[in-house]
Image (tube, rainbow, N blue to C red):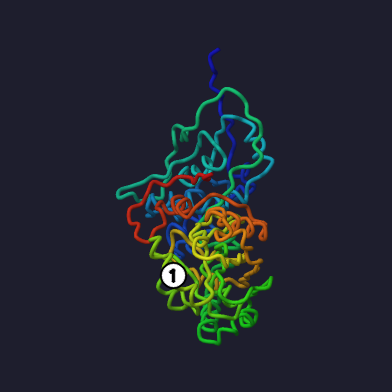
Amino acid sequence: MAKVEEIPMKTTLEGTLLKDSDPFPYFMLVALEASSLLRFTILLLLWPLISLLRAAGRGGLALRVMVFAACAGVREAELAAVARAVLPKFYFEDLDAAAWQRFSSRRRRAVVTAMPTIMAAWFAKAHLGADQIFGPELAIGRFGLATGFLRERAAPLDLGRSVSSTPASNEAAPKPVIFHDGRLVRRPTAGSALLVLLWIPLGIALALVRMAAATLGPFHWIRPMARIFGGELTVRGKPPPTGVLFVCNHRTVMDGITIAASLRRRIPSVTYSVSRLTEILSPVKLLGLTREREADAKMIKAALSMGDLVMCPEGTTCREPFLLRFSMLFAELTDRIVPVAVDCRVGMFHPTTARGWKAMDVFFFLMNPRPAYEITFLDQLPMEETCAGGKRPQEVANYVQGVIADALGFERSGYTRRDKYMLLAGNEGLVSAAKPCTPGYPRIRT
């Protein structure tokens, strides 16, 4: 019997799939992440006008004001990158569970949005499983720059999913957002955006004071000084004697520094792709990896022969409660391995970036009103769980990943540094990588 093409179930994004019907916060994100703080401020100043237009029943005109203010003169590639790397996290947090259940009950799905399709298409495809998206199209002028004007799309944007004639059972949940970029922690409504702008001058001053205290004062004062200046450092567990490799998960560029501060010893840390400014300001020695296996192994062995060392085998940070796949290099170099579970909390700014200026990562961490770190020293690996006890290096790496994941309540994954950077930045995350790769959604490796 011939298959009959199922008519896609059309569901509105704003106000249905998303609980909030106001797209203003998403245009604020585009203004900041695809352009500048100045454009972010200008759009916020236009919020009273936008609100008046909507109250007067001129919602279409209000939308066009937001589109023009956020997108005019911005490169199409930047808008697409923000739609892929920044917006999905905020869409996901605002997703209505009941609406998702109804939407996911159909095999063929279509999303209707008032926003330019370039802003919503990636989330609709990668996380909601939509087949089509209906919405206005952003006009792109010469040199790939957005004009800031909309044109209605005559046909839906086909996202290339296969056609099926049978209904689907409800999916338990949409595909989670594991990797995301951007500096803002909270969705910038008009109120929260105003709070961010008012805080920035004070946050800059506070970050400078905190940085001076950490770099100029005695190293063993860092922990008590963190509390004095509004931060928090919680330490659990009992670390072993010296001469071990502390293996931790990677949350921010501050991980190694914080572990050293917890021990009140200037323990060097193995790093990769940190800025020169971070190296200069760091109160501990940072040993840069080259990604040349033999050279890196030689460098790490030399450092271990002189005492303790901190290493993050994930190779890159992850903001969500997931652990990326651990590189097995550390397991081949020593059998004195101490897993360390690391977590941090920030309320306003993310201190990590894949697309932005990495030199500002520490500064953004210190700009948060109450940044907090939790360091948990776990038991040293027993000999039978090391390579010296007969385990293969990958088995040791997987075991340490599991121990740390269990301690934090995080989920283990097979994602890698390359997966993260391919999604967020369109390259493989290598310092020397100049040619961008075609971005795609990362696939868990087994």
Which one is nearer the viewer's eye here, 169 or 259?
A: 259
Label 1 residue SS: helix
Packing grade of label 1 (10 A; few <14, some 14-19, many >=20) is some
Quadrant of the image containing the N terminus: top right
State the residue at coordinates (54%, 74%).
308
Query: In this rendering, is residue 107 above or below 124?
Result: above
Which one is nearer the viewer's eye here, 207 or 35?
A: 207
Spot occupied by residue 97 in the image (x, y as percentages of width and height): 68, 43
- Number of labels in the image equals 1
Which one is nearer the viewer's eye here, 342 or 145?
A: 342
> In this image, 291 relative to 416: left or right?
left
Which one is nearer the viewer's eye here, 247 or 383?
A: 383
Quadrant of the image containing the C terminus: top right
Q: Residue furthest top?
A: 1
Query: In this rendering, is residue 155 above or below 318?
Result: above
> In this image, 68 relative to 24: left or right?
left
> In this image, 251 relative to 78: left or right?
right
Can you tell which quarter of the image residue 262 is in?
bottom right
> Residue tagged by mark 1?
359
Query: In this rendering, is residue 41 above or below 428?
Result: below
Looking at the rendered structure, the kind of residue marked 1 is Ala
Spot occupied by residue 264 in the image (x, y as percentages of width and height): 59, 81
Spot occupied by residue 385 in the image (x, y as percentages of width and height): 61, 58
- Residue 206 showing in the rendered view: yes
- Residue 53 showing in the rendered view: no
Spot occupied by residue 277 in the image (x, y as percentages of width and height): 42, 74
> In this image, 183 relative to 295: left or right?
right
